[in-house]
Amino acid sequence: MTEGGEPEPAASLRRRLGTRLLRRAHRGLDAVSARRSSAGAPTRGLALTGTVWTGGDSEPEAGVVVFDGAGIVRAIHLGERPSLPHELLVLGGVNHWVVPGIVDAHVHLGFDPGLDEGGSGTVSGLRTGLVGVRDLGAPLRLAGIWQTGRHKPPRDTPFVAAAGPVLTAPGGYPAQSWGASGYAEFLTGPAQARSLVQRLAADGVDLIKIALEPGSVGWPVPTPDVVAAVVQTAHNLGLSVVAHALTQDMVRRAVEAGVDELAHTPTERLSEALIERIAASGLSITSTLQTFFSGGAGREAAANATDLVAAGVRIHYGTDLGNTGTHPGVDPRELDRLADAGLGRLGALRAATEWSSAAAGIRSRSGLIRVGQPATAVLLPSSPLTEPGAWRTPSAICSDGRLTVVTAPLRLPAERPTT
């Protein structure tokens, strides 16, 4: 009620109650974090309750996940709800779901509205349950600002891996388009390619990205011997190589050179023989299907994705943030595209959690909820299998030893220019 006795506006009441819940949650965690028994038993500070999916090939089941004050999973109770300690903060309920957080294996943080041109600000996405991102193309000066490395990410920020600049032929993609301002570095020959990869490794990149993109105008692309030099040098230094290759010829060049991953699902239909070769090589692929649908090339990419899934190729969830139709945070449409490619909705979640967490450059993320491991768990208000849109309004996120209680609905920014 207001001072004059009139009912408090609903929006104001929700904000006030949300703030109170957030303060209570942090007080509860702070209090229990300070308590440890004389026997040294792990502190238990938080319980998330609802339908629990621990990731991998497990099946969802009613239960409770208990974390200590440092965010370590201390117990997973499935079935009948156990008796919980009085001091434990309990969030969730019968309609909620407890699931691992999602990792986006392909973003361009230079187009993240949460960051300014100098690279400062907050990387978007944690408040939708996005616990990790991988930037696949940015100047080193920016990549070095965003990278998480082995340190805890800043509050409200997901883990960030970065490839640094895209390696390309002189005058090649993306230097003639969105990557004109330091987003690309040029490869002039095998010896120079080896030297450039060594320098990037010394500068601390998490992986290497190479562009094999002729486009519709015939941009130059790295020759096979240059691509092979990049891959061999990176592998000798313990780094994986991701290739931007959308056509059959360029995908074949990438496979022959031994790249580890394709940054996109190709948009030119692949032959059955090439798909079998991809599957035999162990090469994985990051999806980025929704942005292709937004740009008009989705049907061919989706058909390739279906064939690749049927052949046993592992596909990571990735949105290509910064391109047509993309928004920061978890994109339910990309999850639907993966489900439609033959993974089903539970398989799509596995691709976005466990498989994306295993993508090159990602550290300290497993995509699983396991006892004794640090948690990257999300409390959703409803089933993500019935409606993937639940990811746009999670109730709480436990990641990197921190609890984030979401008290306001997500507001999507205006769409950014195509990159």
Image (tube, rainbow, N blue to C red):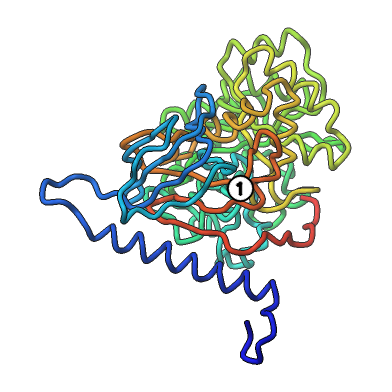
Q: Residue at x 44, y 42 (%)?
A: 201
Residue lying farthest to the bottom in this orientation = 4
Amino acid carrying label 1: it is Pro
- Residue bearing mark 1: 381
Residue 234 to residue 415: above or below: above
Q: Residue at x 75, y 9 (%)?
A: 272
Name the one closer to the observer, 3 or 40.
3
Question: In what quadrant of the picture does the N terminus appear?
Answer: bottom right
Q: Residue at x 57, y 55 (%)?
A: 127
- In the shown orientation, is residue 234 left or right of residue 211? left
Q: Residues within 10 Å of mark 1 (few under 14, many from 20)?
A: many
* Labels in figure, total: 1
* Residue 226 lies in quadrant: top right
Q: Is residue 370 visible?
A: yes
Which secondary structure lies at badge 1?
loop
Name the one closer to the observer, 374 or 24.
24
Residue 418 placement (x, y as % from top left) = 80, 51
Q: Is residue 358 visible?
A: no
Residue 262 placement (x, y as % from top left) = 64, 29
Name the one closer to the observer, 389 or 314.
389
* Residue 105 lies in quadrant: top right
